[in-house]
Image (spheres, helix red, strand yellow):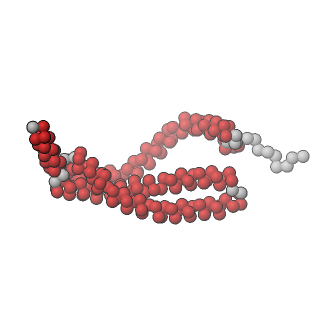
Amino acid sequence: MKKYLLALSLLGLSLVAHAQSSPAKKALVAKLLQLQQPAIEQAARALAERPAAQMMQQAAAALQARVPADKREAVGREIQADIKTYVDEAVPLVRARAVALAPSTIGVLLEEKFSEKELKALIAIIESPVNKKYLQMSGEMQKSLVEKLVAETQGAVEPKLKALEQSMAKRLGVPSSTAAASAPAKPASQP
């Protein structure tokens, strides 16, 4: 009897799973993935570029500390060329793989968590002219916010930033740019 109930339960679950993954639903998920492909590609680009950006920051610090001043510009250009080569090779690879993985990751989640009706509504939202206009304005809106935010908080944040820089310079035993800028100028010629 238990085996019979278990078999019926499994059959019921498979019917529910089948109903959730109809060809129409799969087509909606595919369309949604196509609409989201630019965002998927951008996420992949950011993922591939992140280590290069971190290395560039580390290289900039090392250039100042370890490379003679007369060679810094040339070494800096070489490092930038190396990073460009990495980005040119890695980004297309990661982007293509992200697009290929999207159906088996994002697509599976969409099929599991959304009904056909919800997927249709989501596609309608994404394709709506109002949404497209909103997305086109996102850069302008962010710029506007950041400009006003900087203007209104700069006076309060700058002293904190200078204090942090001085504290870090003191802990590292190096002169801070704030301290160097505020130091009195040495006379051009000393007797």
- Outermost residue on the right side: it is 191
Taking the spot 46% from the left edge, 61% from the top edge, the residue there is: 90
List x then y, in percent, for residue 42. Answer: 39, 56
Question: In this figure, what is the number of numbered marks?
Answer: 0
**112 on left or right of 176:** left
Taking the spot 32% from the left edge, 50% from the top edge, the residue there is: 134
Q: Would residue 6 be visible to someone looking at this image? A: yes
List x then y, in percent, for residue 22. Answer: 16, 54
Taking the spot 76% from the left edge, 44% from the top edge, the residue there is: 185
Q: Camera-side residue: 16 or 2?
A: 2
Q: Camera-side residue: 48 or 6?
A: 6
Taking the spot 39% from the left edge, 60% from the top edge, the residue there is: 95
Q: Quadrant of residue 73?
A: bottom right
Q: Camera-side residue: 164 or 97?
A: 97
Q: Would residue 125 be visible to someone looking at this image? A: no
**155 on left or right of 31:** right
Q: Camera-side residue: 13 or 152?
A: 13
Q: Quadrant of residue 163?
A: top right
List x then y, in percent, for residue 83. Answer: 54, 60
List x then y, in percent, for residue 167. Answer: 64, 36
Location of the N terminus (image quadrant): top left
